[in-house]
Amino acid sequence: MGCASLSLLMRMLRSGSFSDKRILLIDKEPKIKNDRTWCFWETKPGFFEEIVYKHWNHIDFVSAEYTATLDIFPYEYKMIRGIDFYNFCFEEISKHENVDIVYGNIGNWHWTREGISLTLDNIEHKITTEEVFNSIYLPSSGQKNTTLVLQHFKGWTIETSQPVFDPSKAIIMDFRVHQKAGTTFAYVLPFSPTTALVEYTLFTKTLLKPETYDTELKNYIENILGIKVYTIKDKEFGVIPMTNEKLQFDAKGWNIGTAGGQTKGSSGYTFQFIQKNSEEIVRKLINNESLNTILPVPRRFRFYDNTLLHILYHNQLPGKMIFTNLFQKNKPQQVLRFLDNESTLIEELKIISSLPTWPFLKAALKSSTSH
C-alpha cells in the first residue's frame, strides 16, 4: 500500500474498466501516519494534482561556489504529503466493493497452477488470481558488481513566531552543511512565512546514528538558516536505495515502484517514474496488451546513472562539486528533463560536457565494463 501500489490501483479504479475484477491489497498495517513527503516537478496538472500540498515556481540552489534563484517555468516543483496521499486513495477505495484489504506480515510466495500460494502471518493461503503486482524491494545478493548508495534523510516541519521563510521558492539543495560523511545537503520547503519542512539528506554507503540527524538538523536551522526560536511540529525519516542493480519489472509477477526499477539510480527520485509506469500498465491492461511490451529504462539513462553512482560510491569526486556544476552550467529546465529521463541526446551531451571530464570518463569505462 505504498506509492506504487496505490498509484496503480487509483488509476485502475478511476478508469472504470476493472469493476468486474476483484482486487486484493495486502500490507502489514493501515496507512494512518504522515510518514513521508514526495517531491517532483511537472509542466501541467498531474493525476494527483488535487492533493498537492504546495508548489513553487522558483527553486534555490546554494553552495559556496554558486548560489542562485532559478525560474523553472514551465515546470512547477510540487510536494505531496504522505497522509494526504493515503487519505485520498483510501477514500476512493472505500467506494469500490470489489477491493479487499488484508493486513499481515507477508512471507514467501510462489506461483501455483491456479494463482499464487502466499504466506501471511506464517499461515499459507492459496489465492486464485490473474496478476500479481509486488512493490516490496529486497536487495539482490546474487548480482555481481552491484553498487548501492543509500539516500537517507530526516526532516522536521518547524514553525516560527516571526516570518523567516519565503514561501514563493524552495531550496532544493543547500551544500553549506559539512561533507564529512560524503555527499550531504539540506533542503527547505516553505509552506508559509512561518512554517517549513527542513530536511537533512545524505548520499552515503551507511546510515548515521539516529541522534546525529537531530544534531545536524539543529545546527543547520540555528547556525546556517539563523533561526534560533522554533517549534518542531512533525518529523519524518526515510531511506531510499540508489543502485545499479538490474531490477526486473517482469520478475516473479510484476514488480512496481523501487522493486521494479522506478527509483532513479543516481538521484533517488521515484514519484514521477511511478506515475508514468502506472499509467502505462493500466493502459496495457485496458487494451488487453501484454505487460511484457512495457519497455525498460533506456540504456543510455542507466549508463548515466551507473556512472554517477560509481563516482559517488567510490568518492572520486565530491557530490557537492558535481551538482554545483550541473546547476551552474546548465538551464534548470534541462537539468530537470535530464533527471526525468526526458532529455534529448543533444541536451545530455551538453550536460555531460559541463561535468569534470577525466573522473567521469574513468567511471564511465568502469560502468560499461561491469554491465
Image (cartoon, rainbow, N blue to C red):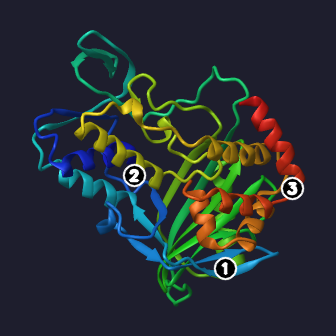
Residue 62: where, in percent of width, then height?
71, 75
The reply to whether callout 2 and callout 1 are in contact (CB within 8 Å) is: no
Residue 3: where, in percent of width, then height?
39, 48
Quick one: label 2, few (<14), some, or many (20+) residues within 10 Å? many
- Residue at position x 57%, y 72% from top? 188
Q: Residue furthest right?
A: 358
Classify the position of the N terminus by image quarter.
top left
Q: Is residue 171 left or right of residue 99?
A: right
Instruction: State which tag comes first along the sequence, 2 or 1.
Output: 1
The reply to whether callout 3 and callout 2 are in contact (CB within 8 Å) is: no
Q: Which mark is residue 225?
A: 1
- Residue at position x 58%, y 48% from top? 264
Residue 318: where, in percent of width, then height?
82, 57
**Quick check: 187 above or below 133?**
below
Label 3 and label 2: CA atoms lie apart by 34 Å
Q: Which mark's residue is nearer the viewer, 1 or 3? A: 3
Q: Which mark is residue 357?
A: 3
Quick one: label 3, few (<14), some, or many (20+) residues within 10 Å? few
Q: Is residue 274 left or right of residue 14?
A: right
Residue type for callout 2? Gln
Tag 2 secondary structure: helix
Q: Is residue 75 left or right of residue 125?
A: right
Residue 347: where, in percent of width, then height?
66, 62
Q: Which mark is residue 275?
A: 2
Give the total of numbered labels.
3
Residue type for callout 1? Leu
In this orientation, which residue lies closer to the viewer: 110 or 369?
A: 369
Residue type for callout 3? Thr
Q: Is residue 10 visible?
A: yes
Classify the position of the C terminus by image quarter.
top right
Instruction: State which tag comes first along the sequence, 1 or 3.
Output: 1
Q: Residue furthest top?
A: 113
